[in-house]
Image: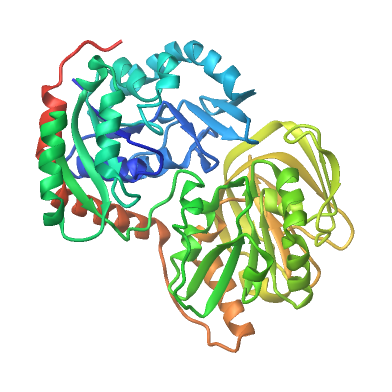
Amino acid sequence: MTLAVMLQGTASDVGKSVLVAGLCRILYQDGLKTAPFKSQNMALNSGITPDGQEMGRAQIFQAEAAGIVPDVRMNPVLLKPTSDRKAQVVLMGKVATDMDAVSYHEYKPRLREQIISVWQSLAQEYDAIVLEGAGSPAEINLRDRDIVNMGMAEMAACPVVLVADIDRGGVFASIYGTLALLQEHERWRVKGVIINKFRGDVALLTPGIKQIEDLTGVPVLGVMPWLEVDLEDEDGVALQRGKYLRTGERPIDIAVVQLPHISNFTDFNALAAQPDVRVHYVRSPDELHNADLIILPGSKNTLGDLAWLQQSGLAQAVLQANRRAVPVLGVCGGYQMLGETIVDEVESGLGTLPGLGLLNTITHFAHNKTTTLVAARVQGELPGMLAGCADVALQGYEIHMGETTLTAGCRPLLWLEKNGIPVADGAISEDGLVFGTYLHGLFDSNVFTRNIINALRERKGLPALDITLDYAQYKSQQFDLLADAMRENIDIDRIYQIMHQHQESAC
């Protein structure tokens, strides 16, 4: 019998994704073949499986924590918002359609059988599965067609542990209110509560814990302290809450423009892990003042975010900084924005708009999305600060719906290996101060990253540093730190007991 438990939250961004990763790591350490599962994920941070399927980054890093290769079955439905009202629907790794919220709510019952089939397929292959909910199970307006919280727990016939974030305040009210809004058969399924992100002496919580247990009949399984572990975030909520607002002084300052529809900002986690780099996210022109490098990240609404750049004054600020010889990098949608022209009748419907004009490129959007893992190599001869990166090997992935053509005065940045044939990617200006690429994950290569950082150090009169950071090993260490902290602060034996003792018939 496959062991299973589901972590649901009292709200979004309570730390479910991280705790699922930690529990996956614990089960893996204990010798169980373990997989994560989230039936429906809404996020702009996505990645690619080895067979070219798109899924949420949260389930990818949870799979890494479990010591397994990511599989699209672990996230069969991915919603990627393209505006405040619409989202791209990705089913089993491929784009299905675009829908507004009402249409999707009506569509959800049609997904139920597919989700059940995927769940059963995983359950046959793994000893244990750790499921993750989305938002809160107490969204009573969505209960009738739920496929990701209690609806999913019913399909999987698994117990639920509720996660509550004490850092945002009102933790006991959120626990009590969530449980009070659940129907009786749903509340029966909740076997414990984890209080997350606590700062201070746990003894101060003891009276409150006893009272909430008396009031609800649900035991508190542990109190997790605020952890400084460096793991990927599921979506942009973390940016909105200021998680990446790093104020510490470091020699190299890298500014990432926080676009309204920013996607795959996890690209820069490996960069931020470098000990001499401060990565900070900016939303106003004055925040670019001290930047040694400006990065335009990916976007799920390239033309909409380009218009925001213009309106916010950031576009002009980026151009002015580049005239002062500050280098500018664009990744995916950010790369498209750096060009002369973007033609989009697909994603935003805004038609043809001029880009920032920093690269001699033209981008045309297409209906077909490119999704692939890829090996790459930096061009053999590059100007300026990228000279030290010549011929460096890279690994990464592509997720984009546009094709970019280079015109006069522009050369490719990379060669991608596709079916044994080198294919040009990206572009670099003649002076080497502006460059862009469709390749996500390029900073995961320490050789490439250190060459870039050392070039920035040299521009400031600082000596180069010989630092070796194996990012895959670094992430593995973070998973172990998380697992250790969870074993220390949560009753893991009780969670094992909950999984073993829960009995009901699955769909």
Q: Residue furthest right?
A: 408
Determine if residue 359 is in view: yes
Direction from residue 44 to residue 368 in the image, left or right: right
- The residue sitting at 54% across, 76% down in the picture is 252
Of residues 258 and 4, the one drawn nearer to the viewer in this rendering: 258
Of residues 73 and 213, the one drawn nearer to the viewer in this rendering: 213
Q: Quadrant of the N terminus?
A: top left
Q: Is residue 429 above or below residue 18?
A: below
Determine if residue 218 is in view: no
| Rendering quarter of residue 342 | top right
Give the colour scheme shown.
rainbow
- The residue sitting at 16% across, 30% down in the picture is 216
Give how far across and how far down residue 106 sits, in percent. 54, 13
Direction from residue 224 to residue 36 in the image, left or right: right
Give how far across and how far down residue 169 sits, in percent. 32, 49
- The residue sitting at 60% across, 37% down in the picture is 371
